[in-house]
Amino acid sequence: MNLEQLFLDNKEQTIAGRYLTLDSIEPILQRLNTNNELSIIGQSVLGEPIYKYQIGSGSIKIFLWSQMHGNESTTTKGLFDFFNVLKSGSAFATQLLEKFIFCALPMLNPDGARLYTRENANKIDLNRDSQDLTQPESNILRTTFEAFQPDYCYNLHDQRTIFGVSDTGLPATMSFLAPSYNDEREINPSRLKAIELIAGINDVLQQYIPGQVGRFDDSFNLNCIGDTFQYLGVPTLLFEAGHFPNDYEREITRKYVFISLVSSFQILSENDIVFKGIDNYLNIPQNKQAFYDFKYKNIKINYDGIKKLSNFAAQYKEELIDNKIQFNAYVVEIGDLSDRFGHIVYDLEGAELSDIEDNNLELHKKADFCLKNDTKFVNGLIKK
C-alpha cells in the first residue's frame, strides 16, 4: 500500500497550521457523523463540549485521545486524516472497520486549545492529573477508558523543536514510548505488546524519515495518564509529533502521524507483530534535547574591553495574537553551545554588532540585530 498516496487522498483540507480549536473541528465531526458515531460526553472547565467519535464493529478496541495539551494539534490533524480513510468506502476502510472499534476523543482539552496553552482553563496539566482526577477533562478521559475497556491506548501529543534523535543532528520528527508500569521499568506482557507495535511502526517510518524517529524517556510517573493506563494493564503507545526541517506549521509531520496510525492498524489487523524481544525497540535512539531553532556562530563580542568570539542561540516562542500563532524568535543562550545543533545555523565569521542604539545581545530579547557589515537579522532570520 502506498501510504503517502493514501495520505494525500484523505488529508482533511479544512484544517491546517498549529492553531486548532473546537471551532475548527466541529464542522468536520458533524460531516463525519453519518451513522450516529458522534456524541458529547462532557464539558470542559469553561463549558465547551468534549466529543467522542466511535466507529467500527470489530473485536479489537482502540482508544485514542488528542490535544490533552491544548497547544499540541499535529496529532489531531493526523487523526482527522485517518477518520477520512474510515469514511472513504474503500476495501481497506471496510477491513479496518470490521477488525476494530475506534473510540476517539479528538480534542480532550478544548479550553487549552482555544487559549493555546498546554494546561486547561484551571492551569492544570491534564497529563499530571491521572491519579487525583481534579479536572472535568481528566474524569471524562478516565470514565471513557473504563467504559470502553480498550485493548490498546494511543496517547497523542506534540513535542517542541528542541528535541532531536540522540546526538545524530537529526530532528525527532516522530518519537514514541511504551510507558513504564512501575518504578523498575520492567517489561510485562502488556507493555511488551506496545513495545512490539512501536518497533513495527518504526520499521515503516524508516522508509520515509530514516534516522528521524526517537524513543521517549520511560521514567515512571503514575500521575501521567499513559503510565496509569499501562499500570492498569492496557498496552499504551505515546506518540510525540516533532519537527521536520522548515515545517513549523507541522503540515509535513502530520503525514508521518497519519502513516504511524495507519501502519500500526495494518500490523494489528494482519497480526503481523514480529516478536523479536525488545531489541528492535531499544535500538530506536533516545529522544534528546539537542536543538535550538537558530544557532549563530562566531560573533565578536566585547567582554570588558576585550573582543572575543562567541556564539548565541535563539528560539521561537509561539504566541497567540489576534487568533493567529506568530513565531517570534528570542535570544535564549550565549556561550559555547557545542552541545546543541541548530535547525538554522548562521556563521557570522567574526562580525561584530553594529553600534546602533539597543543593538546588543541580551537573553530573552527579540532576535533582531544588525552587524557592522550591514547584515541585518529580523525575527532570527537574515533579511535579504
Image (cartoon, rainbow, N blue to C red):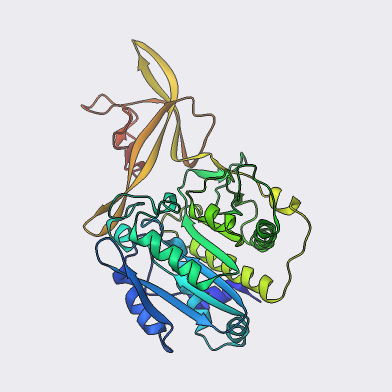
Rendered image quadrant of residue 328: top left
Q: Residue at x 55, y 44 (%)?
A: 164
Q: Can residue 358 be seen?
A: yes
Left or right side of 268 for 97: left
- In the drawing, does residue 244 fall left or right of residue 121? right
Establish if 165 lies above or below 111: above
Q: Nearer the viewer, residue 5 or 156?
A: 156
Assign the C terminus to one quadrant of the image.
top left
Vertical comparison of 240 with 87: above or below: above
Can you give x and y, in whole percent of width and height, for residue 51 in the image? 37, 73
Whether residue 173 is visible: no
Q: Nearer the viewer, residue 27 or 106?
A: 106
**Vertically, is 145 above or below 376?**
below
- Location of the N terminus by quadrant is bottom right
Q: Residue furthest top?
A: 305
Q: Is residue 247 above or below residue 144?
A: above
Residue 153 image offset from top left, x and y in percent: 55, 64
Across the whole image, how many numbered discs are drawn on residues?
A: 0
Question: Which residue is more in the foreground, 301 or 141?
Answer: 141
Locate residue 377, reporting x and y percent. 33, 39
Image x and y of residue 86, in percent: 52, 81
Instruction: Decide if residue 147 is on the left or right side of residue 354.
Output: right
Front-most of residues 315 and 149: 149
